[in-house]
Image: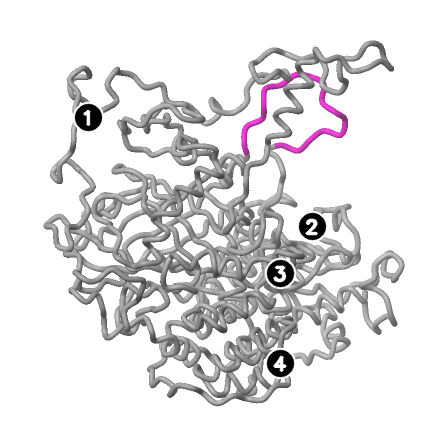
C-alpha cells in the first residue's frame, strides 16, 4: 500500500507558522469539535416560532432515493420534521404537551386523551432488539474513489477507473451490548455498504483478518462462550472470564484469532487507525469471465495504532464513548478518515491454496510478503449521521449483497454467514422489507416482484407480480450477462460422500499463531504476555488456565513461560513440534511514521500564562490539522482582557488518555478546588510545584508513552514528576517553538523508547 512519511512536511509547516507566516484568523473555539447544534442557544427559552434548524455542517443522511431505488431529487430536509409548531404524528397542531387531559386540575386522566395515548404508545415502542453481536457501534457516510487498478480481475462497475461510489461504514465491537464501553479488548467490526450502480455491495469484515472458527455452524458456540455468563450476566463486553477461555482452550482452531485479540489489535486507538479485513476469500470475475481468488484489506492512512491497556481501562470509565466521539469529532473538524482498499489476489486453482495455505480456511492469513496488497481505491468518510437510530442502528448488512464481478467461495464460515444475516434482519427490523429503510435503500432501479409484508413503503403498480406473465407486458424481464445480470460462477463442485467433516489442511492450528507471535516487536510481545496474564488471572478454574498454557506451549516457549510465571503455574511442554515459519514484518504496528491529522493536543496553562504563547501554540496545532484543547484551573476563558481563549477542560475534568500529546505553558499554580473533598485526584500531600492533578496528568501521559513539551518553567514540573529533561519524548524550550519536534514524535504514535522490553 502507498505510505507517506509526514514528519518533515508537518515539522516544516509548523515551523513556518511559528516564524510568522500568515495563518487564517480563528475564533476562540474554531477547530474544536463537539458543538451540539448548528447555532449557539440564547440564555432564555425561545418563544418566537421558527422552522426546524438545519443539521450541522458535518452531518448528512441517506441519499434521497425512493424505496425502489429511484432518485427523488428531494433535499434531505424534505424527509426530516418540518413546520414551526408541535403536532401529532399526522400533523395536527398541539397547544400543550406537558399535561394530560383531566376532569379538573386534580381529577382523573380521561381515556379520550388521544395525544397522551399516541405519545406514550410511540415511546413504549421506540426500542428495537439490539444486535446479538456488534451491538455497540458507530458509523459515518463517505465516498469510495476507485483507482481502476482492479479492472483486470473484476468487472464490478464500482471498481472501474475514476468511479465514485457513496458508502456508509459502521464500526463496532463484537461482544458488548449497546451500552458497553468502546475501549474494551475485543474484535472490531468494519462493515462497508457500497451503494453501486449495479446494486448494493456489502463488505462485512473485521479489524482482524482471521476468525475463531472455521465453520459457520460453530458461530453460536463462540458467541455463547464470549458473552457474559448466563447466570449472572457478567462480565460485560469482555473475554476475561471462564467460559471464553474454556472454549478457546478446547477449540484450538481459535488460537490464531485469540492471539490477535490479545495483541494491541484488540484495543485500537481509534476507528480511524484500525485496519479492516474481509476475513474470507472471495472470487472475482472479469469481463472475459476469468476468475481470481481475492482477500480484501482496508489500510488506514493514519497507520495502525492502539491504546495501551491502562489507557483502555481508564477510558472505559471516564469516556466510554471514546471511539465514537473520536470518529464524529474528526469528521466535524475536517480531518476526514481515509483508508485504501487493497486486494491480495491468487490463482483460482482447483485446490484453492496458495503457497501451501488453504484459502478457504478463515483462521489463516496469506502474509503480505508472499502476496502483496495492491491498492484499488480510496475510502473517505466525510459526513456524520444526522440521526443515529435511523442510520447507525437500522443499517442492515449481508454478505449475500453481492454485485456482478464479485462472488462467494466455499468457505464454510462464509456459507453460514450467507444464511444467517437475513434471519437477523427479520428479527431486528420487523419484517422482510428492511431494504426499504432509507439507509439500506439501493441506488439502482428495483423491480423485484416482492410484495406486501410488514413496513411495505413502496407503492407497487401492475397486476402480475409473477413470472412468466403477459398482463404486465412480460415485465420484469430476465437479464443476461451482457445486460448486467449477477451470474454465479459455474465452478465445478467436488464430488464426495456426505458427512460432517473438514479437510485435513484445516487441522493446522499453531503455525500461523506462531508466525504472528514471531512477527511482533519486543514491546508488542510484552503487551501480548500481559494480556494473556490479565485475562487468565480473571478466570476462576485452574484447569482452564492450565489448558490454555498447554495451547500456548505449541505456539512459543517464551510466551508460554512468561504467562505461566504471571499465573504462578508450571510451564507445560509442547505436544507438537514448533512450526518453522518466516516472520511477516507487515503484521507489526511499530517502526513507521504516519500523518498526524485529527490528533488531540492538550495545552496546560494557568491563569497567569503568557497569552502570546497560547495563541502561538493553538495556531500551530490547528494549522497542522490537529485539535488543540486548552486545560486550565477553571472553565471560562483565559486572557479575558485581551484576545481570550476558551477553556475546554479543567484540571478536575482532564485525563491524559484523551490526548495524544501534552504541552505545558509553565507550571500552573494549584486551582481553588485542589483538595480531596472536592476532587479525590488532588488528595494526599501536595506537590512541591503546581496543582497535584496536573502532576497526575503529566505522570500518566509519560507512563503511556505520550509526547511532552513545555516552557516557562515547565521543567520544574517535570522534575517534580521524576521526569528528566532530555530523555526520550520530553522537550523543554524557551517558547512554543519546540512544537515541530513534538509533531515528529506524534508521527510515530508513541515514544516507544519508554517501553523497555525484558525479551
The magenta stretch spans which residues?
A: 39-55
Q: Residues within 10 Å of mark 1 (few under 14, many from 20)?
A: few
Color scheme of the displayed model: one colour
Residue 380: x and y in percent read 40, 48
Q: Where is mark 2, residue-wise?
A: 648
Q: Nearer the viewer, residue 98 or 81?
A: 98
How crowded is the residue under tag 2: few (<14 C-alpha within 10 Å), some, or many (20+)?
A: many
Residue corresponding to mark 3: 659
Name the mark on residue 467: 1
Task: Label 2, secondary structure: give it.
Answer: loop
Q: Which of 693 and 11 is in front in this view?
A: 693
Which is more foreground, mark 3 or mark 2? Answer: 3
Of circles 4 and 1, the one toward us is: 1
In the structure shown, which secondary structural element does the residue marked by tag 1 occupy?
loop
> Is residue 54 one of those drawn in magenta?
yes
Chain-order first, disc 3 or disc 2: 2
Measuring 15% from the left and 33% from the top, which residue is drawn there? Answer: 479
Q: Does the magenta stretch include residue 520?
A: no
Contact, CB < 8 Å: mark 4 with mark 3?
no
- Which class describes the residues within 10 Å of circle 3: few (<14), some (14-19), or many (20+)? some
Tag in front: 1 or 3: 1
Disc 3 from disc 2: Cα separation? 13 Å
282 relative to 471 in the view: left or right:
right
Helix, strand or loop at mark 4 = loop
Q: Which mark is residue 162?
A: none
Task: Report the predominant secondary structure element of the magenta stretch.
Answer: loop
Q: Earlier in the sequence, mark 4 or mark 1?
A: 1
For marks 2 and 4 on the same chain, the one whose residue lies earlier in the sequence: 2
Residues at badges 3 and 2 in contact (C-beta under 8 Å)?
no
Amino acid at each position: 500500500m502507498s505510505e507517506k512519511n509526514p514528519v518533515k512536511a508537518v515539522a516544516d509547516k509548523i515551523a513556518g507558522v511559528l516564524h510568522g507566516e500568515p495563518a487564517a484568523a480563528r475564533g476562540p473555539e474554531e477547530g474544536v469539535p463537539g458543538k451540539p447544534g448548528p447555532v449557539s442557544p440564547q440564555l432564555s427559552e425561545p418563544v418566537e416560532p421558527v422552522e426546524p434548524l438545519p443539521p450541522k455542517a458535518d452531518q448528512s443522511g441517506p441519499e434521497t432515493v425512493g424505496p425502489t431505488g429511484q432518485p427523488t431529487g428531494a433535499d434531505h430536509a424534505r424527509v426530516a420534521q418540518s413546520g414551526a409548531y408541535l403536532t401529532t404524528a399526522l400533523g395536527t397542531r398541539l397547544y400543550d404537551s406537558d399535561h394530560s387531559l383531566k376532569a379538573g386540575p386534580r381529577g382523573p386522566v380521561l381515556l379520550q386523551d388521544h395525544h397522551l395515548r399516541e405519545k406514550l404508545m410511540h415511546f413504549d415502542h421506540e426500542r428495537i432488539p439490539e444486535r446479538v453481536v456488534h451491538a455497540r457501534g458507530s458509523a459515518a457516510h463517505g465516498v469510495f474513489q476507485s483507482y481502476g487498478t482492479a479492472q483486470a480481475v473484476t468487472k464490478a462497475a464500482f471498481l472501474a477507473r475514476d468511479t465514485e461510489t457513496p458508502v456508509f461504514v459502521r464500526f463496532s465491537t463484537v461482544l458488548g451490548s449497546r451500552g458497553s464501553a468502546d475501549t474494551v479488548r475485543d474484535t472490531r467490526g468494519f462493515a462497508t455498504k457500497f451503494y453501486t450502480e449495479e446494486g448494493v455491495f456489502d463488505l462485512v469484515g473485521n479489524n482482524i483478518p482471521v476468525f475463531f472458527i472455521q465453520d459457520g455452524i460453530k458461530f453460536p458456540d463462540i458467541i455463547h462462550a464470549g458473552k457474559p455468563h448466563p447466570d449472572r450476566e457478567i462480565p460485560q463486553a469482555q473475554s476475561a472470564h471462564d467460559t471464553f477461555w474454556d472454549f478457546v482452550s478446547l477449540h484450538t482452531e481459535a488460537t490464531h484469532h485469540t492471539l490477535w485479540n490479545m495483541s494491541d489489535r484488540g484495543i485500537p486507538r481509534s476507528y480511524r487507525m484500525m485496519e479492516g479485513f474481509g476475513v474470507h476469500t472471495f472470487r472475482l470475475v472479469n469481463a472475459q469471465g476469468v476468475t481470481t481468488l481475492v482477500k480484501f484489506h482496508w489500510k488506514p492512512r493514519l497507520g495502525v495504532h492502539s491504546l495501551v491497556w491502562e489507557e483502555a481501562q481508564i477510558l472505559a470509565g471516564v469516556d466510554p464513548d471514546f471511539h465514537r466521539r473520536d470518529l464524529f469529532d474528526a469528521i466535524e473538524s475536517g480531518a476526514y478518515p481515509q483508508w485504501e482498499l487493497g486486494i491480495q489476489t491468487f490463482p483460482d486453482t482447483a485446490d484453492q491454496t496458495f503457497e501451501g495455505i488453504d484459502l478457504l480456511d478463515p483462521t489463516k492469513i496469506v502474509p503480505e510478503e508472499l502476496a502483496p496488497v495492491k491498492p484499488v481505491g480510496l475510502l473517505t468518510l466525510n459526513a456524520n449521521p444526522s440521526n443515529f437510530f435511523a442510520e447507525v442502528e437500522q443499517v442492515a448488512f449481508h454478505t449475500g449483497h453481492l454485485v456482478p464481478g464479485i462472488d462467494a467461495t466455499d468457505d464454510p464460515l462464509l456459507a453460514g454467514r450467507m444464511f444467517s444475516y437475513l434471519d437477523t434482519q427479520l428479527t431486528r427490523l420487523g419484517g422482510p422489507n428492511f431494504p426499504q429503510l432509507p439507509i439500506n435503500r439501493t441506488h439502482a432501479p428495483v423491480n423485484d416482484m416482492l410484495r406486501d409484508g410488514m413496513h411495505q413503503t413502496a407503492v407497487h403498480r401492475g397486476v402480475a407480480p409473477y413470472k412468466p406473465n403477459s398482463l404486465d407486458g412480460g415485465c420484469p424481464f430476465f437479464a443476461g450477462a451482457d445486460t448486467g445480470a449477477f451470474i454465479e460462477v459455474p465452478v465445478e463442485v467436488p464430488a464426495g460422500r456426505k458427512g460432517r467433516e473438514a479437510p485435513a489442511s484445516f487441522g493446522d492450528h499453531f503455525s500461523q499463531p506462531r508466525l504472528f507471535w514471531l512477527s511482533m516487536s519486543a514491546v508488542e510481545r510484552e503487551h501480548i504476555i500481559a494480556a494473556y496474564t490479565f485475562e487468565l488471572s480473571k478466570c476462576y478454574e485452574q484447569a482452564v488456565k492450565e489448558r490454555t498454557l498447554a495451547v500456548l506451549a505449541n505456539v512459543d516457549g517464551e510466551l508460554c513461560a512468561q504467562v505461566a510465571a504471571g499465573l504462578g503455574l508450571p510451564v507445560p511442554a509442547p505436544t507438537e513440534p514448533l512450526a518453522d515459519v518466516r516472520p511477516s514484518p507487515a503484521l507489526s504496528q511499530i517502526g513507521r511514521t504516519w500523518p498526524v491529522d485529527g490528533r488531540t493536543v492538550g495545552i496546560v496553562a494557568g491563569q497567569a500564562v503568557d497569552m502570546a504563547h497560547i495563541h502561538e501554540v493553538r495556531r500551530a496545532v490547528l494549522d497542522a490539522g490537529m485539535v488543540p484543547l486548552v486545560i486550565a484551573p477553571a472553565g471560562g476563558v483565559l486572557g479575558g482582557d485581551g484576545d481570550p481563549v476558551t477553556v475546554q477542560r479543567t484540571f478536575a475534568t482532564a485525563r491524559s488518555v484523551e490526548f495524544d500529546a501534552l504541552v505545558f505553558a509553565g507550571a500552573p499554580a494549584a486551582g481553588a478546588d485542589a483538595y480531596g473533598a472536592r476532587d479525590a485526584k488532588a488528595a494526599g500531600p501536595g506537590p512541591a510545584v503546581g496543582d497535584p492533578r496536573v502532576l497526575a496528568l503529566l505522570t500518566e501521559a509519560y507512563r503511556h508513552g505520550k509526547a511532552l513539551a513545555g516552557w516557562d518553567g515547565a521543567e520544574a514540573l517535570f522534575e517534580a514528576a521524576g521526569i528528566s529533561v532530555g530523555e526520550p519524548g520530553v522537550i523543554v524550550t524557551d517558547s512554543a517553538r519546540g512544537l515541530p519536534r513534538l509533531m515528529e514524535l506524534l508521527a510515530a504514535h508513541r515514544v516507544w523508547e519508554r517501553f523497555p522490553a525484558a525479551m
